[in-house]
Amino acid sequence: MTTALSRDEWIERARAHEARADMLTAAHRERAARGEKHPVWDFLFTYYSYKPAMLRRWHPGAGVVLQDAPERAGWRWYSSADGDAVVPDADLFRAEKPQLADLVERMLRRTASRPGQFGCFGLHEWAMVYREEEHRHPVPLRLGQAGTDAVVETHELRCTHFDAFRFFTPDAVPRNRLPLTRDSQPDLEQPGCLHAGMDLYRWAVKLGPLIPGELMLDAFELARDIRLLDMEAAPYDLSAWGVRPVRIETAEGKAEYVRRQREFAERGTFMRERILDAWIGASTGSAAHAGH
């Protein structure tokens, strides 16, 4: 059944979305105005490279008709409906971006189909500084270089996420349980991975108007929450920024990490379902498009 929103209805939702987006990005925008860097939160705007202004733009989601919306008639992946009504068009998106559509659907469905793995303990960040004197982040190591190296050497690296693995130091690469490549990413991504959960924000943004703005901001909040654990469990001393470490080199730290990792995996699973439902619809078979 097609959903239609009157102009008053969709304008109200758009304004509420803008206010929520402004609240979520306020601290970052204030820091940026001062030229101040933050080793935890800048990641959400630099690695993903989506600016606060982009988060403010509300869309209704695929198939939701916006009545009396002539100003959106020329917006990308919107189709005209009756009169001045417009609607985000999933078919138009797939026709224009077939490879992207196939990739996003494949990543979402395949990741959702696998059991979560919970034995990595966030060691990907430790592998990024292993046996290296110069680091990507100008932040001191909590255990020093020798102590950090020792943690890596007494654990098995079990990273499954290529976009973390590609930042491993040369000495850390052969220590990973599996060699990872960009081509193998859809075959190895799994819901226990913190970065797979953060990347749901990326996929929601890439789908543009096909995803309701409220859901896109939910994905941003999930990425924000995961990012904190990612840095709490990292080897860096972030006490100057008020970050309490999760000491994954201890049994207690490992237990806390896994508990919170499982909670994020559950949130990510629900988020994948919501994204697929908003974009494609729950009734669409998994084999309907990209050979899933």
Image (cartoon, grey):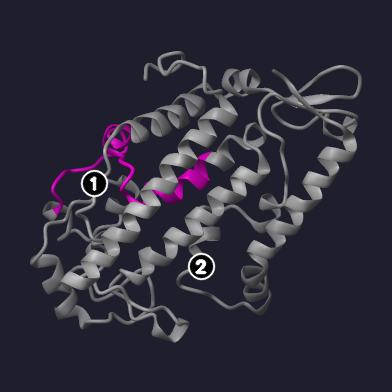
Q: Considering the image in quadrants, where does the N terminus appear?
A: top right
Q: Residue furthest bottom?
A: 240
Q: Is residue 134 above or below residue 16?
A: below
Q: Residue at x 32, y 82 (%)?
A: 140
Residue 139 seen in the figure: yes
Mark 2 packing: few (<14 Cα in 10 Å), some, or many (20+)? some
User: Taking 66 as reference, is 28 left or right?
Assistant: left
Q: Where residue 170 appears, x then y in whole percent? A: 19, 58
Secondary structure type for disc 2: loop
User: Taking 185 as reference, is 144 left or right?
Assistant: left
Secondary structure type for disc 1: loop
Q: Nearer the viewer, mark 1 or mark 2?
A: 1
Q: Nearer the viewer, residue 234 or 174?
A: 234
Residue highlighted by disc 1: 117
User: Taking 67 as reference, is 200 left or right?
Assistant: left
Mark 1 packing: few (<14 Cα in 10 Å), some, or many (20+)? some
Q: Is residue 195 above or below residue 279?
A: below
- Residue 41's label in the rendered image is 2
**Dot 1 or dot 2, earlier in sequence:** 2
Q: Determine the image quadrant of residue 227.
A: bottom left
Q: Which residues are magenta?
A: 176-203
Q: Is residue 221 above or below residue 68?
A: below
Q: Where residue 97 appears, x then y in whole percent? A: 56, 25
Q: Identity of the amino acid at label 1?
A: Gln
Q: Residue at x 54, y 56 (%)?
A: 221
User: Taking 33 as reference, is 234 left or right?
Assistant: left
Q: Where residue 141 appears, x then y in whole percent? A: 28, 80
Q: Identity of the amino acid at label 2?
A: Trp
Residue 131 seen in the figure: no
Q: Nearer the viewer, residue 237 or 261?
A: 261
